[in-house]
Image (spheres, coloured by chain):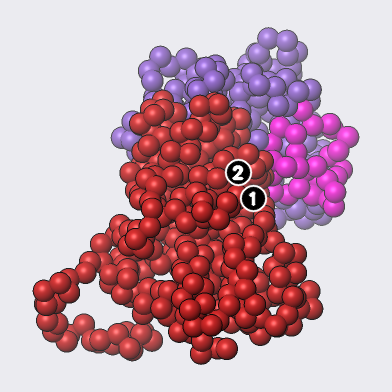
Chain colours: A purple, B red
Amino acid sequence: MTASPAKEGSNLSLEQRAWGIRRNALLMGEVQGQGYIGQALGAADLLAVSYFHAMDYRPDEPEWEGRDRFYLSIGHYAIALYAAMIEAGILPETEIATYGMDDSRMPMSGMAAYTPGMEITGGSLGHGLGIAVGAALGLKRKNSASFVYNMLSDGELGEGSTWEAVMSAVQWKLDNLIAVVDFNNQQADGPSTAALATGPGTEAAKWEAFGWHAQEVDGNDIPALVAAFDAARNLPEAKPRVIICNTKMCKGIPFLEEREITHFVRVEPDEWQKALALHDTNRPD
Amino acid sequence: MTIGPNSRRKSKYEPRQAPGAGGARTSAMIASLDAEGRETVSAPFGNALVELAKTREDIVGLSADLSKYTDMHVFANAYPDRFYQMGMAEQLLFSAAAGMAREGFTPFATTYAVFASRRAYDFIAMAIAEESLPVKIVCALPGLSTGYGPSHQATEDLAIMCGMPNLTVIDPCDATETAQATRAIADHPGPAYMRLLRGKVPDVLGEYGYQFELGKAKTIRDGSDVLFVSSGFMTMRVLDAAAALERDGVSCAVLHSPTIKPLDEETIAREAAKGGRLVVTAENHTIRGGLGDAVGAALMRRGVHVPFRSIALPDEFLDAGALPTLHDQYGLTVEKIAQNVKSWL
């Protein structure tokens, strides 16, 4: 695979960053012996592109006014975002061993009050995009050039409140709002497409029909993600943007990828080290 | 088919007669409280917000297709670029208000009390209250203030909202207090829920030299036989009931407690502990989980054991009808208050 350059000043490729995010997530999963590792591994590439290509932020100043905001709706993906923020230097690597423990700054579900860089309290799904609409309106009032990114899941598209926000973002011409949907087609009771999400090939058309600029990409293809994020950021039209990322749960750890995939992937105690050892042999050049 | 426990309601299959001349009354949504023959003030909330916004550039207004019916249109007309129409979408209304608060603004978000409390609860809880963001939720048609039926009668809004940590809950009495409380919640650093009296709102407390203070209950009049502890427009009603009872030789004090949460337990307990008085709570809210329950529990916890009664709405979905009819039916009128108090003495 050809290495994709990260933004200026970064000496690692996006592939290496995604690898690092996966490694951090596996280490945190091992700490608790559980976690939403399938989601974290699947979303590592889109998070690498968000944090090392698209977004502007200061690792040592998480509330810097000029930052792009990243709103994680899906609180259970916290392990993935912690892994990315550790890779980005927003959170210290030394706290990996505290993940999910009492008094940790990294609780199992993402909450703004606990964690530097965690902008909103997720977990109750269908909140993030509405909050993002308000923040995007607020940023416009302040004449800010910052973007608001909202990472949603495919299951979250079943929440009616998400669509209230979808309509409002068009009404207010929120060209500073970028929704990123992790479409892994897996929600708690089974495939999202067996519930309310319509799935690859049709999901983008739905957003377009509402008036959004919509792109659907392979969410584990870093060059494709880079192109999609660039297009979303540089679009001249005054409309909100969505990137639907079709991802594979457990991406990067073949023996987990092959496991019967469920919302909460079962990993045996001895498998964490096995996964880490395998992962360490696969570091991109 | 007969459904549910409201068996006292006449069968829907029983034909009704048109009312006689002068008997026609309406169950229209927007009923006025100004039938009290008092001075009224127009849109005290909207006008107070406009005044406040002159110096507070952080204030923005949002509504979910109800700006005209929450007096938010007054603000929207004065500051069109600071008003955000969020459409008929209450979950979005409060989420977006949270987003604006995150960016440093002080949003006032208005709708009807039923829609904020019942429909958008999770959004207010998780997007606003959990982080104590300074969103001010101002809601019309609290309790029984419309004859439109249960879809618009927020009879349990205080119970719902008082269950939410971090949320300050206010039930103002009149125009004077609505304006004062608007300024107070704007200055309050956290989130607040304020019940709104809109349109032409009676002005009652001005003549008592009253000044609203967040978290404070205040004695409006003193008396030796009965201590009313009341909130919202029920304070107007108990003041009138107190005057009527005085003519019958019953001396009533009125302690107005507009802040339902945090309740001024200290003042309430001190007043109740003076002894020799029947304590009567009065609220425009279901008997479950509102002012009456909060006062009763506070007195018990503080060891103040006094005769205690509550005037409140029943634990039912209420009827549709003209507001005066319903207030009489459910015991919120001056006459019914006086009658009940006499029966309890």
| Percent position of residue B197, x then y | 43, 54
Q: Please tell me whether the stretch drawn in magenta is mainly helix, strand or loop.
A: loop
Q: Residue at x 48, y 32 (%)?
A: B51
Q: Residue at x 66, y 24 (%)?
A: A51
| Percent position of residue A6, x then y | 66, 15
Q: Nearer the viewer, residue A50 or B271?
A: B271
Dots 2 and 1: beta carbons under 8 Å?
yes
Q: Which residue is mark 2?
A: B184
Left-right relation of B44 to A116: left
Chain ID, mark 1: B
Q: Secondary structure at mark 2?
A: helix
Q: Nearer the viewer, residue B319 or B331?
A: B331
Mark number for residue A108?
none
Chain ID, mark 2: B
Per the model, the C-alpha gap separating discs 2 and 1 is 7 Å
Range drawn in magenta: A90-118
Label 1 crowd bin: few (<14), some (14–19), many (20+), radius 10 Å: some
Up the image or down, B37 lies above or below B87; here it is below
Up the image or down, B329 lies above or below A199; here it is below
Q: Which residue is mark 1?
A: B213
Pointer 2 and pointer 1 on the same chain: yes
Quadrant for the C terminus of chain B in the image? bottom right
Up the image or down, B330 lies above or below B89; here it is below
Q: Nearer the viewer, residue B237 or B27?
A: B237
Look at the image and tell me whether residue B79 can be seen: yes
Q: Earlier in the sequence, mark 2 or mark 1?
A: 2
